[in-house]
Image (spheres, coloured by chain):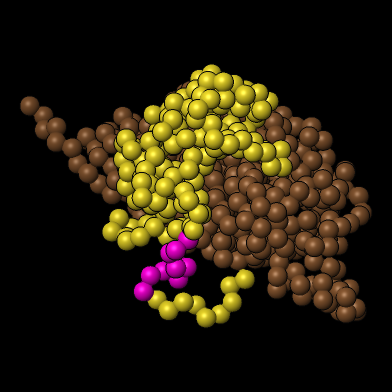
Amino acid sequence: MANTETMTINMGPQHPSTHGVLQLVLELDGETVVKAVPHIGFLHRGVEKLSENRSYHRALPLTDRLDYLAPMSNNLGYVLAVEKLLGITEQIPERAKVVRVMMAELTRIKSHLVWLATHALDIGAMTVFLYCFREREAIMDMYEKLSGARMTSNYFRVGGLSLDLPEGFENDVREFIDAMPGHIDTYEGLLTGNKIWQKRTIGVAKISAEDAIDIGLTGPALRASGVDWDLRRDNPYSGYEDYDFEVITRQGCDTFDRYKARLDEMRESCKIIHQALAKLQPGAILADVPSVCLPEKKDVVNSIEGLIHQFKIITEGFKPEPGEIYQGIEAPKGELGYYIVSDGSANPFRMKIRPPSFVNLQALPQMVEGALLADVIAAIGTLDIVLGEIDR
Amino acid sequence: MSQAAVAKLKGAFAASVLDVKEHRGEVTVTVKKEDIVAICRYLKEEAGYNFLCDLCGVDYLGQSPRFMVVYNLYNITTKERLRVKVPVEEQDACVDTVSGVWSTANWPERECWDLMGISFAGHPDLRRILMPADWEGHPLRKDYPLQGPGREPYQGRLS
């Protein structure tokens, strides 16, 4: 008689392939996972509680720190939500909208690059990691040029942008996206046809479309299960309706198809950025809503009215009329939603963030139960989680 | 249209719909707590709201009822949103779980219990999720101090 006693082991919170501080309690029968229980919360900073105690402008920097691999997407979701709450969505200048789309797509590429790098590294393909981080570094440099920070950009503002694009920025972006499809081909050359990669990903961590909707998967993970849903196309925001791009869906429902879906999404992002560059015209970067937007710096230093204006917005903030709104955007990892309740004061009365990773991680147990221990690592990688936004 | 779904819902659950509001083009329906599972199942199966985006609690301290549990629904076919809310009294801060309708409700309900102190009857695994298991209190309640319990309040400005 073989001994069939199961063994319970901890994976994480300090395990390199849990992508942060995720703890998984695994019950194993030999190498087969019988049960997986994720434990989260190690990175809980109380972002929602903090934002209830600061004005709308001052809650914005907290959002960078959610999904720190895609800070501008978090900013975008937040400013769109507040603009909707204020009812000024229609007044955002065209230039601001185009720059937002361009930066959101660069952010998507940046986030997908870290996903591919770490996912491949976890499974054992080390070279891809170095290539991906090389390209990511170029995006980080652009971030730094634009906002002064490599990760916590805090660049968008309620009503538009904080600064205009620096000199030569458009050329940097153009050079980057001209080269990017070639880089993606390089990654594919290393992985797609690679027998080991295929063995480690095809048929691994499968989830059907029905189960995926039931458990709440969104983003590329859902689209790789054959559900054709992308908020950029279906509930467009920030002018996405004017861009021509394809929503990548695949039918495989497994780790390999999620990999292919994200790679193809990066190519689509390059297409969108090309179109954004073509649309980019000189113009205002902040909406003409003095009660919400800060005045230009030259007005602040040259006129008393400008100074008072700035002082009032900094000290008092703005007060949206009472009401509640939900704004979802297609962040790199799935649907990022902000539900904000206003009671008419200058602070959000309640701000609930719907982080895509939090909901996506819920699918992990059903993806790995019955699979091998080694596939748990592939499953964590393919879900593309960031603990910063899971724990908030 | 979400309004059409609301009209249908009113037809099926006339006595349960307490209030319908529209703000910035978004429809919010407030319904009675007792019928939330039946209403969610109806919205999912009859009205096509097959995706639960988000679930959370809101604390209106000083008002009665004190809490609201908010369900943000989405219809993947027609790409429409609908928000359902249920009022919850402080003395009886418990709502029936909708995790039988959408499995995705599991973690958000745990989070709502953890941070807001609203429990969910029939939930398969109602434990704290973000705070440590032995934590006392529910931090997102309005009467919970920002700096945490047992500490001098912060003297500087927060906003």
In the image as oriented, which residue stretches furthest toward the left? A1
Name the quarter where the N terminus of chain A is drawn.
top left
Looking at the picture, tell me which residue is in the foreground, B16 or A230: B16
Q: Residue furthest top?
A: B46
| Circle count | 0
Q: Magenta-highlighted stretch: main secondary structure?
A: loop
The answer to whether B120 appears left or right of A358 in the picture is left
Residue A167: name its quadrant. bottom right
Image colour assigned to chain B: yellow
Work out whether residue A169 or residue A74 is closer to the camera in this orientation and state it: A74
Position of residue B75 measured from the top left corner of the image (x, y, whole percent): 60, 27
Q: Where does residue A240 sit, x and y in percent of width and height?
A: 76, 38
Q: Name the colour assigned to chain A in the rendering.
A: brown
Q: Is residue A252 left or right of residue A246?
A: left
Q: Is residue B138 visible?
A: yes
Magenta run includes residue B149? yes
Which residue does the image show at 53% across and 20% down from the upper left?
A: B12
> What residue range appears in magenta?
B142-150
For the point 72% across and 29% down, the residue is A246
The answer to whether residue A129 is magenta is no
Could you tell me if residue A17 is visible in this image? no
Q: What residue appears at the point 48 percent right and 43 percent down from the top-left corner?
A: B87
Q: Position of residue A54 (x, y in %)?
A: 60, 66
Q: Quadrant of residue A238?
A: top right
Q: What's the residue at 66%, 28% (across, down)? A: B3
Residue B79 in the image: state x and y as whole percent.
65, 28
